Image (cartoon, helix red, strand yellow):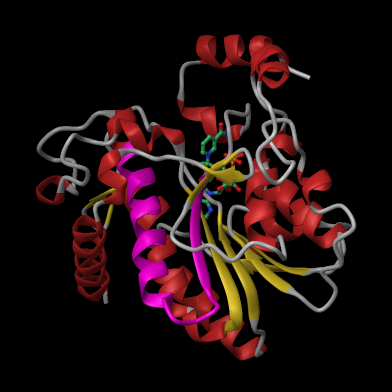
Amino acid sequence: MSIVGMLRGKGKNGFGYNTTAEEVTQGLSLNGKTYLVTGSTSGLGLETVRVLAMRGARILAAARTIEKAREATANLGSVTPVECELSNPASVRGCIEAIKRDGTRLDGIICNAGIMALPRLQTAFGYELQFFTNHIGHFILVTGLLDRLTDDGRVVVLSSALHESAPKTGIEFDNLSGAKGYDAWKAYGQSKLANLLFARALARRFAGTKKTANALHPGVIVTNLSRSIPAVARGAMAVISPLILKSIGQGAATQCYVATNQTLTVSGEYFADCNVAKSSPVSYDAALAEKLWIESEKIVAGLS
Ligand SMILES: NC(=O)c1ccc[n+]([C@@H]2O[C@H](COP(=O)([O-])OP(=O)(O)OC[C@H]3O[C@@H](n4cnc5c(N)ncnc54)[C@H](OP(=O)(O)O)[C@@H]3O)[C@@H](O)[C@H]2O)c1
């Protein structure tokens, strides 16, 4: 157990910082359930696929290419690879069509894929790439699959504690291209705030139904996510990781909990360490979340 883990207690539900994905799903049968997981090829997504499949679920494992998904998830159980390159709307739409053709109803969509802190400004379709991949890609995917969700289906969106590093105003609608200024961490923070606002706006649309939408911070875990940060910093993280960071099993726990725990009914919440947590003040701004939804719809409409 890490030093931080030793200092952190458990939440009301008996789960906390140290809980792993296996522990949080202990005794649970997911036979007959189907989950779509994006970013299934590494880190938290791969662990989520492994553990949910181990509990009996069928998993639609989304990745940039079918081959990548197939290779990463071979031998994990009932796993169907699907292509979903989030920075390419045609690929995301292809994924939606494939799932519709398959006739599958989804008990959950786990929006897990992400990129972080690209050192130089990169864009897709004129939009900063982290915003486009982390938020717009998932916005297209989820809104395209709403009619495939079961009556109590769950949408689980990976945000991050770093949503706090978003610009002061929250979302810079007048700089979504990054052309007026680019800061790698601010842009990542903005994309993760967008993930959180999206979950809250979706939860409002689910009101009156048993469907839920929640966002979460998984903890800090050494994964391929840090591939864009300098090698020295990555090396230092790897050294201190066992002392102060979460393991991958612990990192995947919160998304597995929010996606599957049968006693959980809340919606529009932000979770950390498998419990509801506080997020930044701007993340509770319902008007901002609605504005982001409308702007996202306009962006998507402009792509086709
Ligand atoms: N690790 C942490 O400390 C931490 C902290 C807070 C939040 N998070 C969030 O947790 C989530 C999972 O991150 P992780 O740590 O597991 O990172 P990871 O190991 O790098 O996994 C990210 C996954 O997303 C996929 N992905 C990236 N860009 C994509 C695209 N354009 N289209 C489709 N898939 C794409 C990656 O596929 P490729 O390998 O093909 O690129 C990979 O499978 C992310 O949303 C991240 O923001 C992580």
The stretch of residues the image draws in magenta is 188-216
Q: Residue at x 34, y 55 (%)?
A: 197
> Relative to the observer, which residue lies in front, 155 or 188?
155
Quadrant, the C terminus: bottom left
Residue 103, image x and y in percent? 65, 90
> Relative to the observer, which residue lies in front, 25 or 304?
25
Q: Is residue 197 left or right of residue 85?
A: left
Rendering quarter of residue 221:
top right
Residue 198, image x and y in percent? 36, 60
Quadrant, the N terminus: top right
Q: Is residue 247 above or below residue 179?
A: above
Q: Is residue 24 magenta?
A: no
Q: Is residue 34 above or below residue 169?
A: below
Q: Is residue 194 left or right of residue 61?
A: left
Q: Is residue 111 left or right of residue 255?
A: left
Instruction: Residue 88: tell me if it is visible.
Output: no
Q: Is residue 116 above or below residue 194?
A: above
Magenta part, dominant SS: helix
Rendering quarter of residue 236:
top right
Residue 280, image x and y in percent? 33, 38
Instruction: Residue 162: tell me if it is visible.
Output: yes
> Relative to the observer, which residue lies in front, 42 or 220?
220
Q: Is residue 215 magenta?
A: yes
Q: Is residue 58 left or right of residue 161?
A: right
> Relative to the observer, which residue lies in front, 57 or 289?
289
- Ligand 1 resides in the quarter of the picture at top right
Q: Residue at x 82, y 61 (%)?
A: 53
